[in-house]
């Protein structure tokens, strides 16, 4: 089965790049090992394995997204319960504080939390929060944003090998022949927002440089954006120290608009596959 988005919400998943990733995967030589180094939701690993079932694909599940996938049955049960409670509210309709339904929603959320369920997903059904909130204020108005379909991850990462470690540990174990999918956090972000690694996981220029210095030894598919200045950094290193970590490569860009009042940015896929030593 072909998924074009992750089974459960995941901020930063590469759903806009599924077609390009499939094309690149199809061109890889048989016997390739593909490693999704910053695996997140596993969408990239899924896309490659689905396009090329013959290849070995490794998913680095640094955030333990697998734990969320394992909860899908329970999460669907919570959604069913909420759907019953909110039956009289239209989609996006407001559930005012103090109403019977509001109290029942809070009760269901409290129970889900005590069961250790994926509150980022569940809270998003009754708020307009895009911030991965895992709690709601008792007096806040809620909204009926429930998804209509039941979640399913059937066959999603079938045949994909899962590891869970920092990218540097994973890289140490890999042969140079391994093909890397590289999709790190944006520069200067608190990476703990992605999952279960806790506070203080920061993605800064040092991590960025360490990564950049390693990728060029491999064939790679590198996702980045105009916000993270990967190409600019590589060009600057080349100018200053006559070293290009990215080597010969090609880049595809896609503009992202962020609303009428803010400047958009560009997402990039850079790869050395199909370029010079890339085959
Ligand atoms: C932009 S997301 C990747 C999204 C993924 N490609 C997808 O389609 O869902 C970046 C991921 O890198 C993870 N990460 C942060 N620091 C890491 C590290 N030191 N080693 C490995 N992964 C890390 C984050 O937790 C997050 O899951």
Image: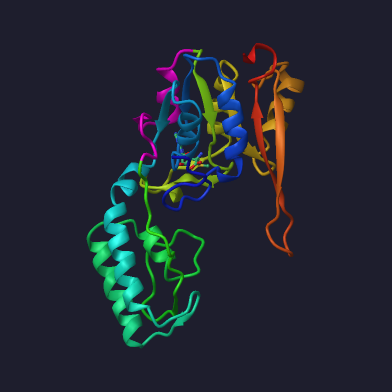
Q: Which residues are magenta?
A: 155-175
Instruction: Compare residues 259 and 78 and report the one nearer the observer.
Output: 78
Give the residue displayed 45% in from the left and 35% down from the top: 46
Please provide percent x and percent y for residue 209.
Answer: 58, 28
The spot of residue 118 in percent (x, y) is 33, 56
Q: Is residue 166 magenta?
A: yes
Which of the 4 image quadrants contains residue 253?
top right
Indicate whether 218 appears above or below 198.
above
Classify 87 as above or below 209.
Answer: below
Side of 104 where 243 appears, left or right: right
Q: Is residue 265 above or below residue 77?
A: above
Q: What residue occupies the far right of the structure in this picture? A: 239
Residue 43 % position (x, y): 47, 40
x 37%, y 46%: residue: 153
Q: Position of residue 31 (x, y in %)?
A: 47, 14
233 or 250, nearer to the observer = 250
At 44% from the left edge and 80% from the top edge, which residue is drawn?
A: 141
Which image quarter: residue 239? top right
């Amino acid at each position: 089965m072909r998924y074009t988005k992750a089974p459960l919400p995941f901020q930063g998943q590469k759903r806009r790049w599924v077609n390009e990733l499939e094309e690149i995967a199809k061109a890889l030589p048989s016997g390739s090992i593909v490693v999704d180094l910053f695996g997140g939701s596993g969408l990239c690993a899924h896309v490659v394995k689905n396009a090329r079932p013959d290849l070995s694909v490794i998913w680095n599940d640094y955030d333990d997204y697998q734990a969320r996938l394992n909860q899908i049955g329970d999460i669907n049960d919570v959604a069913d319960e909420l759907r019953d409670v909110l039956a009289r509210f239209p989609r996006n309709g407001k559930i005012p504080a103090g109403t019977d339904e509001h109290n029942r929603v809070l009760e269901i959320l409290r129970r889900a939390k005590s069961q250790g369920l994926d509150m980022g997903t569940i809270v998003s059904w009754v708020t307009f929060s895009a911030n991965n909130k895992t709690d709601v204020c008792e007096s806040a108005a809620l909204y009926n944003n429930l998804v209509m379909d039941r979640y399913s991850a059937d066959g999603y990462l079938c045949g994909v090998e899962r590891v869970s470690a920092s990218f540097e540990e994973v890289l140490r174990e890999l042969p140079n022949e391994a093909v890397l999918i590289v999709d790190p956090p944006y520069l200067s972000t608190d990476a703990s927002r992605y999952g279960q690694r806790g506070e203080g996981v920061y993605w800064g220029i040092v991590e960025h440089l360490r990564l950049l210095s390693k990728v060029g030894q491999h064939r790679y598919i590198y996702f980045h954006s105009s916000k993270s200045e990967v190409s600019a950094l590589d060009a600057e290193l080349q100018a200053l120290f006559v070293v290009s970590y990215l080597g010969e490569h090609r880049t595809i860009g896609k503009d992202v608009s962020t609303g009428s009042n803010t400047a958009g940015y560009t997402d990039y896929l850079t790869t050395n596959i199909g370029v010079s030593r890339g085959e």
